[in-house]
Amino acid sequence: MYHERGIRQADIATALNISQAKVSRLLKRAAAQGIVRTTVMVSPGLYSDLEEQLEAKFGLLEAVVVDIENDDDELAVHSALGAAAGSYLEATLGGGDRIGISSWSQTLLALVDRMRPFTVGGAAEVVQLLGGIGTPEVQNQAQRLAGEFARMLGAKPVYVPAPGVVADRATRDSLLQDVALTEVTRRWSELTMAVVGIGSIEPSDLLAESGNAFSPQDLERLLAAGAVGDICHHVFTADGTSVTGDLASRTISIPVENFLSIPRRMGVAGGRRKREPIRGALAGGWVNVLVTDIHTAEALVAPDSSAADPLPVGLTP
């Protein structure tokens, strides 16, 4: 009556002329004796076992694995990852966070396009982590990313009034002395969370058009040094080691030590071309929360994932 027909315990007690307490005891005895068994079925599109494997292998706080059919379809990957990242943020933000967000990421643009406004404030501030000034044709994309993200969370946006890469160290040092930038750099040390794309060394169309991409000469030197990916223009190798040098001294971005001290660092990335950069980011501890697709997740947890999946450098951050 209870399990098959859905009749309430009180109604069962009345129908059988017994107490409701006895109905409850009989139901518990049925479960204890194996007469009634509970089976939990995982909903389609959920991969909790795979998420747990990722968390255990890479020491992640949390992993979110998204179901997609084709990981070569970058638009589909961006859409799925953006929706999943938005759901994760809705479930985990409590209102007091100060969140840093990277610029020039197509994946994060998909995130803000799929977020719903929080009914209660999701964060106090949203701060750009990388210079957001670029060519007029695409600069609005970087500003929209930070501004819309802040609006969805009911937070205050803080922009970096400078490009991501400048001509030389003297120019960068001069810009960092500006009052507007010193106020931003102060906020970088107060962040409680970062939301970033995981970029490849080769620039995406958006980054290339912005004027903030690495120059051909920089790319040549980075590839020679074994670079596979970047986060906020901080470049790393396949084992996660930071690549330093002239480029780092010309980048206006949150310093590595500040970034790695942020308690929760969420990377949103997926697709076949991103597996090597994601693997490097995980190996180096650059992110401790990962939102990715099922095909990338399966490749990452494979017994010898680094050798089993040699891939070209990708194009989309």
Image (cartoon, rainbow, N blue to C red):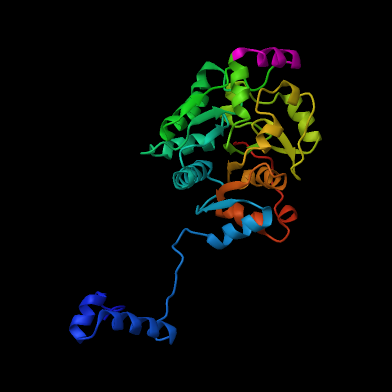
Q: Position of residue 296 (x, y in %)?
A: 61, 52
Q: Position of residue 94 (x, y in %)?
A: 46, 42
Relative depth, front residue between 187 and 132: 187
Residue 131 visible from this viewpoint: no
Whether residue 301 is situated above or below residue 219 in the rendered picture = below
Whether residue 285 is situated above or below residue 219 in the rendered picture = below
Residue 157 visible from this viewpoint: yes
**Number of numbered discs:** 0
In magenta segment, residue 172:
yes
**Which quadrant holds the N terminus?**
bottom left
Magenta stretch, main secondary structure, is: helix
Q: Position of residue 111 (x, y in %)?
A: 48, 38
Quadrant position of residue 114: top left
**Which quadrant holds the C terminus?**
top right
In magenta segment, residue 11:
no
Q: Position of residue 275 (x, y in %)?
A: 65, 47
Q: Is residue 225 left or right of residue 107?
A: right
The magenta span reads 168-179
Q: Is residue 247 left or right of residue 101?
A: right
Identity of the residue drawn at 52% across and 24% down: 158
Relative depth, front residue between 162 and 217: 162
Identity of the residue drawn at 76% across and 45% down: 239
Whether residue 274 is situated above or below residue 12 in the rendered picture = above
Identity of the residue drawn at 60% across and 54% down: 297
